[in-house]
Image (cartoon, grey):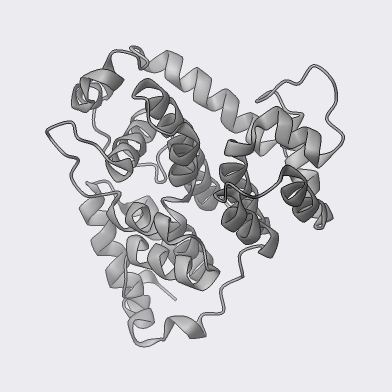
Amino acid sequence: MGIERQKGEMGSLPWSHLHLPPFPPVAIRVLQLAGNENVQLHQLSDLISSDPAFASEVLTIANSLLYAPRFPVTSIQQAIAVMGANHLQGLCVTVGVRSYLGGALSRPSMRAVWRHNLACGLIAELLASAGFMDKDSAYTCGVIHDIGRLALAVIRPREYAVLLGMQSGPPSSILEGERELFGLNHCEAGRRLLADWKLPIDFEEIVCAHHSPTKKDGSWGMADLINVSCRLADAAGFAAFPRCEATPYEELLDELPARERGRFHADLEGLVVEIRGKIEALECA
């Protein structure tokens, strides 16, 4: 069935009837506990260890070139120590979303969306470090900002791949195309997924507002940082769709507040090499 005949069908179908896969329970629980200052390291370690498949992915990432430990990491407690307890939230989002997608990542369109999310998270982490923001929260928000797009790709993969392949305009054209096909755009789908998966409400602004204009006075919040990180990912060649109309890298640097601009990558090539290497390490798990 062609994309034209599919337009708007989901608008009359209740979201609850779509039967989307659940987010891995262990990832949800870690996300809930990771922000609690009273949680002990052994509690997080025991929780992750209770899911062998999830624990195996965490250990693989801990042993990857992303962290390059001096000695093999053989336990979750060691992994948390190597990666840092604060980074655990973002790591669980990474592993959790990838587990949610499963074999769908073998599809080129889905893999492009996923690599864009990873690139956005990694760039947001670098930007946050340059601007003295919370880099671990920035990474987590970057990875999760487009979960609604991942959901749309799971609901109707073939038609959504066609839609992404056809688009060549600004983000607004993508949002309009999604609404025509699904009855809602990926920002709205992301908000619904947050509720369905019972993920922390703190992410709602990120998934809903990451295409909103950034503040011109430099008083950035996390949504502003994710907005520019998302566009920097596109400029660096990690767009979620091949014909993306990316803003030139130099123009994006000019948008950064002075505190980020002075410490961020001056050359695009260096950024691409760094981000590609980190994505490859994350994808090895």
| Res. 80 image quadrant | top right
Q: How many marks?
A: 0
Task: Find residue 220 and report its horizontal and vertical position in percent.
Answer: 24, 37
User: Which residue appears at 72% of the width and 31% of the height?
Assistant: 81
229 w.r.t. 195: above or below: above
Give the residue displayed 60% in from the left and 49% down from the top: 34
Q: Residue at x 83, y 30 (%)?
A: 73
Q: Please indicate whether residue 20 sits to the left or right of residue 48 in the image.
A: left
Whether 80 is drawn above or below 148: the answer is: above
Quarter the N terminus occupies: bottom left
Q: Residue at x 61, y 64 (%)?
A: 23
Question: Relative to the observer, which residue lies in front, 142 or 114?
Answer: 142
Whether residue 116 can be seen here: no
Name the quarter where the C terminus is drawn: top right
Above or below: residue 223 compared with residue 270: below
Q: Can residue 145 be seen by looking at this rendering?
A: yes
Q: Is residue 70 left or right of residue 126?
A: right
**Residue 54 placement (x, y as % from top left):** 75, 52
Q: Nearer the viewer, residue 132 or 181?
A: 132
Percent x, y of residue 10: 38, 80
The residue most toward the front is 38
